[in-house]
Amino acid sequence: MQTELTTLWDCLGQIPDPRNPSGRRFSLQSILSLIIAGLLCGKLSLRAIARWGRRLGREDLELIGINREKSPGQTSMHDLLTRIDVVALEKILGSWVLSLTQEKGLHIALDGKTLKGSASEEYKALHLLAAYCTNISGVLNQIGLESKEGEITGAKKILYDIPVCENIISGDAIFCQIEICRSIIQQEGDYIFMVKGNHPSLQEDINTTLAGTISPGG
């Protein structure tokens, strides 16, 4: 994974543009920058972001590479977001987040969640697995899963797309699996996973080991 310190603007420029070059009025960087800025200003829908963008002055628009009187409309933003390479977008943004620190001993938490309101009559609710770095309060990588049951398979995959070496990987009991732990050790990382009833023998061994009184003197 790329970890060179660079700007968010430069990172956005690395994302493949799915649109026909002859029909582009705004660059991919400009549209994504406008969406990010709108979200940071509390605009939570494309319609709200578009309306907010239309109120920006010429100097503000030039800061994100827009040399026109008006910013992109809702249709332009929607068209780009529905066609963009999501995997490439998440990897590049994750690389930029990671570039904010070059330290070792990072704490990276694996966490799955189902997006509220993402289910419909035609589609199941969207379930995501994220690798969140607590040191920099940023998501290093995130992948979509068909269901919560796919978190184990997803974790095996995501471990090869994040910096594991000399860092600490944590997660709840679902990630306490031999293959996941082995992958982390092979990449010279460490792990802290919860142990529950899914591994009764291991849970019993831990309880037995920690049952005695531990004196400060060892």
Image (cartoon, rainbow, N blue to C red):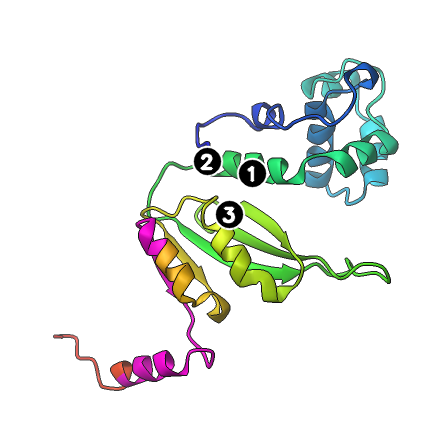
Q: Circle 1: is it few (<14), some (14-19), or many (20+) Cα within 10 Å?
A: many
- According to the picture, the residue beneath numbered tag 2 turns out to be 1
- Any part of residue 41 in sight: yes
Which residue does the image show at 54% across and 26% down from the upper left?
A: 7
Label annotation for residue 137: 3
Q: Does the magenta stretch include residue 194?
A: yes
Q: Is residue 12 magenta?
A: no
First in residue order: circle 2 vs circle 3: 2
Q: Circle 2: is it few (<14), some (14-19), or many (20+) Cα within 10 Å?
A: few
- Disc 3/disc 1 C-alpha distance (Å): 16 Å
Disc 2 and disc 1 in contact, CB within 8 angstroms = yes
Question: Disc 3 vs disc 1: which is toward the camera?
Answer: 1
Which residue does the image show at 45% across and 46% down from the upper left?
A: 160
Q: Circle 3: is it few (<14), some (14-19), or many (20+) Cα within 10 Å?
A: few
Which residue does the image show at 51% across and 47% down from the upper left?
A: 137
Q: Which of these two is toward me, 211 or 16?
A: 16
Answer above or below: position of 59 versus 122: above
- According to the picture, the residue beneath numbered tag 1 turns out to be 91
Where's the C terminus, which quadrant?
A: bottom left
Residues shaded magenta: 184-208
Answer above or below: position of 122 versus 88: below
The disc labelled 1 sits on which kind of residue? Answer: Lys
